[in-house]
Amino acid sequence: MSQTATMTGQPAVAQDTSGPRGPRPKPFFTPKKVILYTVLVFFSLYYLFPLYVMVVTSLKTMPEVRFGNIFALPTAPNFDAWVKAWTSACTGLNCNGLAPGFWNSVKITIPSTIVSIFIAAVNGYALVNWRFKGSEIFFSILIFGSFIPYQVMLYPLVMITREMGIFGTLQAVIIIHTVFGMPILTLLFRNYFASLPQELFKAARVDGAGFWRIFFEIMLPMSLPIFVVAIILQVTGIWNDFLFGVVFAGTQNYPMTVQLNNIVNSAQGTPEYNVNMAATVLTGLVPLTVYFVSGKWFVRGVAAGAVKG
Amino acid sequence: MAETAVRMEAGERTTTRPGFLSRIFLHNLPAKIAALPMVLTVLVVFVGCTIWTIYYSFTNSKLLPTGKFVGFDQYERLFATSRWNVSVWNLVAYGSMSLVFTLVIGFILAVLIDQKIRFESAFRTIMLYPFALSFIVTGLVWQWIMNPTLGLQGTLRNLGWENFTFDWIANPRMVLFALLIAGLWHGTGFCMVLMLAGLRGVDEEVWKAARVDGIPTWRTYVSIVLPMMRGVLITAIVIIGSGIVRLYDLVVALTNGGPGISSEVPAKYVFNYMFSGGNIGQGLAGATMMLLTVLIIMIPWAYLEFGGKGRRA
Amino acid sequence: MQHSVSIRDLSLNFGNVKVLEHLNLDIAQGEFIVLLGPSGCGKSTLLNCIAGLLDVSDGQIFISGKNVTWEEPKDRGIGMVFQSYALYPQMTVEKNLSFGLRVAGMPKAEIDQRVQRAAEILQIQPLLQRKPANLSGGQRQRVAIGRALVRDVDVFLFDEPLSNLDAKLRSDLRVEIKRLHQRLKNTMIYVTHDQIEALTLADRIAIMKNGVIQQLADPHTIYNKPTNLYVAGFIGSPSMNFITGTLDGANFTANDGTVIPVGAYQFVSSAPTGSTKAVLGVRPEHIFIGDEAQGMPYKATAEIEIVEPMGSETLAWTKVAGIPVTFRCSSDIPLAAGDTVTVGFDIARGSLFDAGTENRL
């Protein structure tokens, strides 16, 4: 607007209008920038190198692995090692590949995720909106309990599940994942429900809705984001679990991580590194897919996990 | 008079007792049912199992936990076992290096990412993806990379760098560093995310004030921002610390404790004695020592964080 | 005469968004300038540009005659006070005040002397060893002002410094800042969205909208002779009464047919010839009732709809011939909803705006 120029109040005193004008000059290369990006690229290589090696090795043939170098791209990329890892790699005497482990992991992860999240969601809701005497004390112990090393509780839990007659079954693993997922998930849901406006809950109560009706009809529809975070957290966490799978699942239910470790670390004869790496890639594929698809949500889940400690 | 008083008292008791009971069990019933899994987890698992473990660590249980009370015998044996002592030393050495490097690298990366860089989200994605993978996958990949004949060492030697040495997983003196490289690969991105959240939480006007005051950027980070991130730092230390005490899968996948016993860790020692060593008492004593370690980390933190005022909502 | 701060042809874009456009502003030595406007009008952006915290897209900034367009904030001779105080939380008040000086490597004796002087001026000596967390909001803001004070600079920049305080503290600190200005006689540039702060503190107010200064003038002129409809509506609470109509020679004819003679009105240049669509603005306190109304050049009958007693005065929301009109009168005059009263005003105290350009006529 031209009027502003005349609005300066006092007549402009003749002033040196030469000299710097406009934005500060920003050279494309400054020592600071060069160092910054060098360090970042260096670290990125550190993080990417294993992924690269894993994939490249899995696409090679064994002679190529033996005589080539670890950096080289496969001369004739092929999925033979992948097929073998999936269908016929041996764990000791068993030569069924990773496929059974994959399906076991699916059978463990899906119900464990659903059960643990449902229980934690209801629990977090009760802790925020329906406090009862002692609820906060239990919650505090729950949070501090999450720092107890698993080894401390492992043996008694084996005995308890054995007493219940479910040791070495899928049920046992599901229960264990629910128990040990409870602290972080409950915290997650409790904090989320606490951040929702309390008036909503009060209004629903005045309208005569009870515990479950408010939960299902008011709280759940507003909780989609936190459910996404919880699902990401649990799917990757349970899929990646090794300890509980090896202890509680029983041999026929070993999850993928356990099978993978057996294929690589207790195989007889000459190790087939290309098959090993194919198996490793296959095991990492599910959490990696979750990671790359979920993007920001994964970061949110990680940060939420941080609050837990 | 006295009789009526007694009767009144009795009458009161009969009316208040059901009221009292119903207050405990019936009042707010659905909430209590909903919280039942939590109550059971806390009472049976976190409290019950822990006490059970501590108790039986004082017995001479072998294959089954039925032994008789033997005082501190299991602990004396524990600390007379070189495998346990190596495990503890490994945990201390690996743990302190891992904690320091994770925090330092995590903080530095967060600061670099925070410099309004191009491709920020690409860099972040690259740094965090290892955290999505399991320790088993992490361990196996690095095992392959560090394979002395066919891995990095072999490759670089074939390329003409004859004395290049990277045989850490086969070298008892270096194996902890092998573990460290894999552990840092897995966990530093997570620490970076935490630190970045902390950095982004600092009031932007504080940065402006520091600029007006003429404080150099590095000085602002060290003297102003870092002290402001105390909460995030403590959280990071506690999370990383309790992760270190649990260290198990990574060792199993990368070295399985080898070469020899040079990369054993307490969690693995405990596991082996419980499930394959046939000496439950030893395993439980080791587990109790792990618990003690965690308490030593946790109690000062809990004190600092909650200062006796109880948990804040 | 040397300007303390001069802004020449300043533009700032964030990507394609033009926040400031070809803005010019000259501020005299020792002047207290308030940048006033709603959020998003660019006032804080302008202040950040002056401070050097934002890189300008075009134009120049001079402080004390020196071209500082490319200078770092610390080299511009400015001190700045922020809305969130922006104190360094882990340092005591004394360290907060002295940190910048210590980093600059100033001798300790000089630092102590400056800190003591600032503490004395702001009366925060007893607080020097405390940490910000143990201070009240008002005390924190004093420390923040102190941090600008120890820098011993010519120009003070305030970015909504009182917005985080409650009403009582705000008015206390307002007086305090005015006293500070009278004592130090520094140039001060003060950003706020609070018109009371602007009217009470400023030597001159710059009212901004969409990155453009609408009017730059002393508070009295801004209030009584707003340069356009926007300024007229923005300043004053309750807002000025606006009556739309047509200006034709010496008469303003409201849309409902009421004719108001405008012979006594002082036009900016001269009365427009022919018929012009116009808006007549009258401040609520320039409308009088009862006996006072009788002496006014223009009178009308108003029907009272709502009465708001404010203690020292009373606001009345009325209809004059179907047009909503608000007026302000002494609280001693008894008024009730439903009453019909005679109101009057003097066109010389009103404002006329061109309905098309919205500028003052």
Image: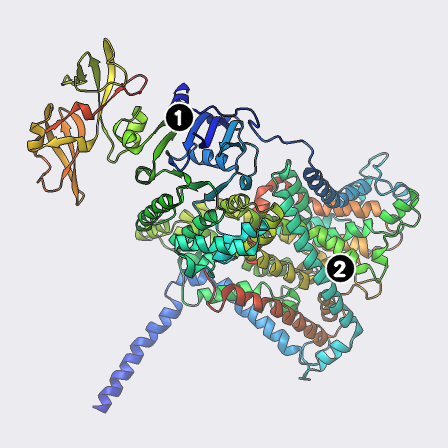
Q: Is residue A281 left or right of residue C5?
A: right
In this rendered view, identify the residue nearer to me: A258 or C123: C123
User: According to the image, label 1 marks what residue?
Assistant: A8
- Quadrant assignment for the N terminus of chain C: top left
Q: Which mark is residue B251?
A: 2
B113 relative to B103, above or below: above
Mark 1 lies on a secondary structure that is loop
Residue type highlighted by circle 1: Thr
Distance, label 2 to label 1, CA atoms, is 73 Å
In this rendered view, identify the residue nearer to me: C139 or A19: A19
| Chain letter belonging to callout 1 | A
- Quadrant assignment for the C terminus of chain C: top left
In this rendered view, identify the residue nearer to me: A263 or C131: C131
> Can you see residue B274?
yes
Residue B127 drawn at (x, y percent): 67, 45
| Chain letter belonging to callout 2 | B
Marks 2,1: beta carbons within 8 A: no
Residue drawn at the location 30% of the way across and 30% of the way down = C222
Q: Quadrant of residue B243?
A: bottom right
Farthest top residue in view: C274
Residue C343 drawn at (x, y percent): 11, 29
Q: Is residue A64 left or right of residue C121?
A: right
Residue type highlighted by circle 2: Val
B210 relative to B74, above or below: above
